[in-house]
Amino acid sequence: MGLHILSMSDPKVTYGTNDVTQTVGLGKDYGETAFGINFGAGAEFSFSGFKAFFEFKYVLVFTKEKSSGMFPITIGFGY
């Protein structure tokens, strides 16, 4: 289980000494912070010096307009 705070700064694009943020279409206000929670489960298996694991999570991010969720799955191997 976990809690997290997500934040993104306003993008700024410069070319040389000129500010070209508006001309590349990045004029949207990105400077907002979101709060999120996640929970999940996983397992790890060991055999002959090797390890394999998998985990899945449910991640829910709350923003001002609406909430969004996703289900990331992680699979890995190690020696």
Image: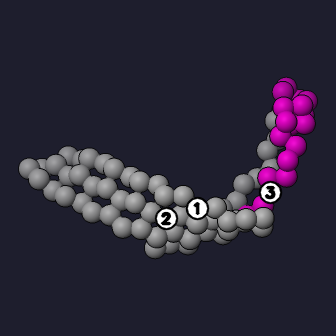
Q: Name the chief secondary structure element in magenta.
A: loop
Residue 5 makes an appearance in the image: no
Q: What residue did someone put label 2 on? A: 58
Q: What residue did someone put label 3 on? A: 31
Where is residue 53 shown, x and y percent of the image?
A: 27, 55
Within the magenta stretch, is there residue 8?
no
Q: Secondary structure at mark 1?
A: strand
**Residue 42 horizontal side relative to residue 62, left or right:** left
Where is residue 26 shown, x and y percent of the image?
A: 83, 40
Q: Which residue range is magenta in the image?
A: 15-33
Circles 2 and 1: CB atoms closer than 8 Å: yes
| CA separation in Å, label 2 and label 1 | 7 Å
Q: Residues within 10 Å of mark 3 (few under 14, many from 20)?
A: few
**Residue 16 horizontal side relative to residue 73, left or right:** right
Where is residue 75 shown, x and y percent of the image?
A: 33, 50
Which residue is drawn at the image coordinates 90% and 36% (left, top)?
22
**Outermost residue toward the left in this view:** 48
Amino acid, disc 1: Gly
| CA separation in Å, label 2 and label 3 | 25 Å
